Image (cartoon, rainbow, N blue to C red):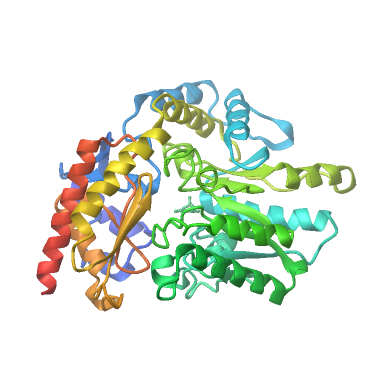
Amino acid sequence: MNDIKTIAEKDRATVLHPFTQLKDFATGKIGDPTIVTGGKGIRIQDAQGRSYIDGFAGLYCVNIGYGRTEVAEAIARQAYKLAYYHTYAAHTTNELANLSDRLVRMAPGKPSKVFYGLSGSDANETQAKLVWYYNNLRGRPKKKKIISRERGYHGCSVVSGSMTGMSFYHDHMDLPFPGILHTGAPHHYWGAEPGETEEAFSRRRAAELEEMIVREGAETIGAFIAEPVLGTGGITPPPDGYWREIQTVLRRYDVLLIADEVICGFGRTGADFGSTLYGMEPDLVTVAKGLTSGYMPLSAAIVGERVYAVMEEAADRIGAFSHGYTYSGHPIAAAAANAVLDIVEKERLGDRARTVGAHFFKRLKERFAQLEIVGEVRGVGLLGAVEFVSDRQTKRRFDPQLKVGARISKAARDRGLIARAMPHGDILGFAPPLVVSEHEIDEIVELAYRATKQVMDELT
Ligand code: PLP
């Protein structure tokens, strides 16, 4: 067994960590890595024996909570029986066929088939290829551009990273890739004119989208991709009327809608899917995270009837569907997903997210809304955020050098709460496991409040 110090040294010497300041890590300025050793319910433990409430469910994924032995057993059973086989050339497993049947029954829109990957990023990469394929097959080879939104997050690979609408994910990486455009964020707090209602703001955003489509030429626009609730870009539910207005424009110009349900799917918003909650009728749906609650890597691009029909119809002419990964539909991941979805259904975690989420927002508003550095408290279901500003009246942001969001997140962590400093602005984000109790919510809100007060004191 390695001791803690040896593990930390090995890690520092060899692991290239995502989203980490490399020099500060290499020189030890930001301390040793946190060695996570275990988890139970909404809590994780580190090697030093410290326990944290995970108010972000890993990266918004561990919806069923940590340490669910039912899932571990399902994984082990499948590993003993058959650890791997591929799904090329019409091979399958029981677990995969059952999972796909289940997803097609429950997904929003008019789902027809499920294509599997391992991450949200690769599933969105697949969605882009499906849009291009679909339009090539129907004889519209120019209809290829994909519109996403500023502040949208769709992953980090070449095309999904380009769809992501935050420049710091592009800088120095030669992104965005040509043919991916960004329209305005559905962020009423930051985007609305003084006095503009949510409905009016939604109409304006839809009009801007329409202008973009017309300017580029509708014959060149293949799809619009969006998260039902903006996630990493600030955890922002759509303003009233947004999805109605946007879908009217998409239908007018024959533009496919890709719903990125990677965060919203499987109960997070209090409904099965964000699309259901907001009346979206997507042609393509991306799921990951909650699909396995992070117990195994698995994602899916769920293909609607409209797109699939064209693909099947062209098959005699063009041959096999030439896209797939060694691990598409991995049987252990499929077994994990089935066991997770059993829990989601049995424990009605979507309903829980709605009721416990209502309690969460009541408590968040009680504690935070009056604080002089709080600009907005927002969210839906068990997905929430508090945004900090230096002046509530003028909505002036803090000097980024002050790192207010990161400091509040760090102060919360020092108190045993993980709440994420969101990357775009001074925002503390919450996405606890959906099994969180009202009592635990009170604890989360209280710890976050005390952390915020600490940083407010430091700022004065
Ligand atoms: N789409 C959304 C909405 C996400 O939030 C994320 C990750 O946070 C992704 C896609 C990318 O998923 P992954 O990190 O599994 O590639």
Which residue shows up at 67% across the image and 48% down it? 283
Can residue 373 be seen by looking at this rendering?
Answer: yes
Where in the figure is residue 100, as x and y percent of width and height? 61, 32
Q: Closest to the observer: 243 or 418?
A: 243
Horizontal side of residue 234 vs 367, given as left or right: right
Can residue 47 be seen by looking at this rendering?
Answer: no
Horizontal side of residue 432 vs 87, given as left or right: left
Which residue shows up at 33% across the image and 35% down it? 65
Q: Closest to the observer: 291 or 215?
A: 215
Which residue shows up at 11% across the image and 62% down it? 454
Which residue shows up at 59% across the image and 62% down it? 159
Horizontal side of residue 257 vs 16, given as left or right: right
| Quarter of the figure with the N terminus | top left
Q: Which image quadrant for residue 245?
A: bottom right
Compared with 122, 181 (above or below) is below
Where in the figure is residue 397, as x and y percent of width and height? 29, 76
Q: Which image quadrant for residue 17?
A: bottom left
Where in the figure is residue 253, as x and y percent of width and height? 73, 62
Compared with 201, 61 (above or below) is above
Q: Closest to the observer: 37 or 350?
A: 350
Q: How many marks?
A: 0
Where in the figure is residue 91, as x and y percent of width and height? 69, 30
